Structures are given as C-alpha cells and as structure tokens.
Image (cartoon, grey):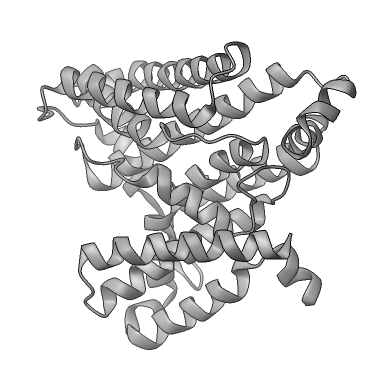
Amino acid sequence: MRALIRSNPALPLLLILLALMIYISPLYQTGPGLMSFLQRAAPLVILTCGATFVLISGGFDLSSGSLITLVVIAGAMITQGDPALAGLGLAAVLMIGLSVGLINGLVVARLHVPSIITTLGALLAIKGVAMAWSGGAPSSSLPDNLRALGRGRISDVPVVGSVPYSVIILIVVIAASYWLLHRTNFGRMVFMLGDNPRAAVLGAVPTHRVRVLCFVVSSLTAVISGLLLGGYSGVSVDVGSDLALQSVAGAVIGGVVLLGGRGTILGASCGALALYSIFTVLNLIGVSQPVRLAVQGAVLVVAAASTSKRR
C-alpha cells in the first residue's frame, strides 16, 4: 500500500473526495450518477494524459485549451450541423491538432524557444484564429453524429444502467497512453529526456523527434477532448478556457514533476479525477466560481510542493 501511494499520491485524495461526493449527494450513490461524473470529467482526464507526456519530457503546453476551442468551432463551421459532413469535419480537426503539435514541437526543438513561451504564443494565436473564424459568436453547431461522442451512451448495461461513449473513449485513451509511455522505447526516451537532456543526447536519443512527438500527443488529446466537450455542452468560444492549466494541475496532483523526468499516466489520471472531484464537491456545497479558482491555484501550489519534497 505504501508503494502504491508513493507511485500514485492522488489516489487517497480521490477516494476521500468520492466518498464525500457520495455522502453529500444521493445522485452519486448510484451507478448512473457515477457514470455521469466520469462523462463530465473525461475531457479533462484525457487532456491531462497528453499534458503528462510534455511535462515528463521537461516542457509545458499552455496552448491545449485554445486548441480545444478551435477544434469545437472548426468542427461546427466546417460541417454546419450537416451529418453528411461529419467525416470531413473530423479529418479537418485532426489535421489542425496535428499541425499545432508539430509547430509547437519544432519551434521548441529546432529553434530552442522555451516551451512555456512557445505555447503561450500559440495560445494567443489559436484563440485569435478561433475568434476571427466564428466572429466571436458561432452561428452553427456540430452534427448529431459528432455530438454523439460526448452525449451518446450504451444502454441496458448491468449495474450502471448505461455507459457513455466518452467513458469508453476515456478508458481507451488512458490504456493507450499508459502503453505508449510505460511500455515502449519511446516512453523510456521521454523519461530520459526529461530527467537529463544532456545524458539523453549522449545516449543517442533523438531528442528533437521525441520532443516533437510529445507535443503532437498533447495536441491530439486536445482534439479528442474538444470533440467530447463540443458534443456534450455545445459550441462556445469559451469551451476550452482554463483547461490547459487544469490539466497541468491534475498531472502535478498525480505526482508528475514539473521539471520533468518523473510521473505516471495512472497517477496523472487520478490527479485529474481528484481535481474534478474538488470542483464537484465545491459546487455541491454552493461555493462560487471565484473561490473555486482560488482553491485550484492553492491545490496546484501544494501539490507541486509535495511532489518536490518527495523527490
């Protein structure tokens, strides 16, 4: 148990928060209630999985929230709500995500611009493109077959009643991220790059390629999160607000070290779920949005300090 908590420090916090949610609200005492919670938390957890690759490699990706907004707006503007154009819209947003990840990675790796500056510039540029494309007020919506990713569900499932598609996508993304980071040579090179970049170079690690791929993974998870958010809550120019910082906070709560070289996908996923649980508990007891933001900042600082002390 001690080893489990050391490798996944967010797990005890998550269990306490889930117990508190169940105690406060009868909704979470049922299978459908817990599935609904996971459905709403899925975009943040998926985005945190992608952010974990960048953080462990020693970088930051602050552009993912704006990319989510652009994905939702681009999908709506391209398809105009027509289900026949869903395939075109899906291909377009995937190409947008891939392009953003490649540009961020190449600027950081080839031009040696610090990742926090690169992605901050990308954040502003992407947000500007999204606002200009939509005119500040999107006039179209995602087609129903794309919205089903965020709102659809499999019915008549024993115990839980139904399973949302977003929960299935969440499980697949966590499993794929775990395999890629912890079971492949690429994952080992990510840890080497974040732990000691100079040693990674001397060890013949293709550091430029690894760094670019980390940003690509982060951007692709932002695309998936954007599709789920757009499907669940609709099209908005604020749909991705604060999610980039929340994904970093979730990863840090889960034991990912901000300076790179340490962390796990399972820990980061539990950290993101714990962070969303904090938001849920605060909402259940009637805490206002400004206070919730203050709590998020405090949790991030305490989690970073705790991780640094353990290290």
- Give the x, y percent position of residue 141: 18, 31
- Give the x, y percent position of residue 21: 40, 79
Q: Is residue 26 above or below residue 3?
A: below
The residue lying at 87 percent from left, 19 percent from top is 204
User: Split into 4 quadrants, where in the image is the C terminus?
Assistant: bottom right
How many numbered tags mark residues here? 0
The residue lying at 33 percent from left, 78 percent from top is 27
Q: Is residue 21 above or below residue 225?
A: below
| Quadrant housing residue 91 | top left
Q: Is residue 220 above or below residue 104?
A: below
The residue lying at 52 percent from left, 46 percent from top is 48
Residue with the most extreme right position: 203
Q: Is residue 36 visible?
A: no
The residue lying at 70 percent from left, 23 percent from top is 210
Q: Is residue 279 above or below residue 91?
A: below
- Give the x, y percent position of residue 123: 35, 28
User: Split into 4 quadrants, where in the image is the N terminus?
Assistant: bottom right
State the residue in front, 43 or 32: 43
Q: Is residue 159 visible?
A: yes
In screen coordinates, is 98 left or right of 289? right
In screen coordinates, is 5 left or right of 24? right
State the residue in front, 178 or 303: 303
In screen coordinates, is 176 left or right of 83? right
- Give the x, y percent position of residue 294: 32, 64
State the residue in front, 291 or 168: 291
| Quadrant housing residue 163 | bottom left
